[in-house]
Amino acid sequence: MSDEYRAGECNIGEEEVKYRKRVAGYGSALVAVALYTMLVFFDVPIVMYLLLLVPVFISVHGFNESRHGFCTSYARTGRYNMNNEVGMTLDVISQDKRDKDRKYAKKLIFDSVKLSVLITAVLIGLSRIIN
């Protein structure tokens, strides 16, 4: 991974990447597994399984951001962080670079939504087999 900001490609450094992977990726995956287990155990109505979309999306998106070295919320607010400290952002000055970041952010979010819906649908299907 590069240690330089590149508009529309990379806007977070190593520490932010590790943070997203650990907190959003694995943390939310753990929440999704716990929620799924409770939903299956209590045999709730199928519509309740849609709650899984939230932690599944956060997990998928956290892994997606860490894999690409790109924070979509930083892109939407015109910021980046290539420092070794989580949350220490700088402003993106160039409007052209901000536009590139926002365009790439939309793509990453859309990709995360698609995969989250697919994973949730598979989990719902599995729950019907289990119960």
Image (cartoon, grey):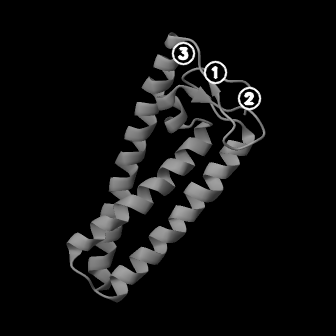
For badge 2, the amino acid type reads Ser
Q: CA separation, marks 1 and 3?
A: 8 Å
Residue, disc 1: 6
Q: Is residue 64 left or right of residue 124?
A: right
Q: Earlier in the sequence, mark 3 or mark 2?
A: 2
> What is the secondary structure assignment of the residue under circle 2?
loop
Residue, disc 3: 97
Location of residue 3 in the rendering, given as x and y in whole percent from the top left corner = 76, 29
For badge 3, the amino acid type reads Lys
In the depicted view, which residue is nearer to us: 87 or 129?
A: 87
Residue drawn at x 31%, y 77% as measured from the top left? 127
- Residue 2's disc number: 2
| Crowding at mark 1 (Cα within 10 Å: few <14, some 14-19, many 20+) | some
Q: Residue furthest right?
A: 84
In the depicted view, which residue is nearer to us: 99 or 39?
A: 99
Location of residue 84 in the rendering, given as x and y in whole percent from the top left corner = 78, 39
Location of residue 96 in the rendering, given as x and y in whole percent from the top left corner = 50, 11
For badge 1, the amino acid type reads Arg
Residue drawn at x 33%, y 74% as measured from the top left? 126
Q: Above or below — where is 77 with respect to 57?
A: above
Which of the 4 image quadrants contains residue 97?
A: top right
Q: Above or below — where is 25 with respect to 108?
A: below
> What is the secondary structure assignment of the residue under circle 1?
loop
Q: Above or below — where is 35 with respect to 52?
A: below
| Crowding at mark 2 (Cα within 10 Å: few <14, some 14-19, many 20+) | few
Task: Verify CB contact (< 8 Å) between mark 2 and mark 1.
Answer: yes
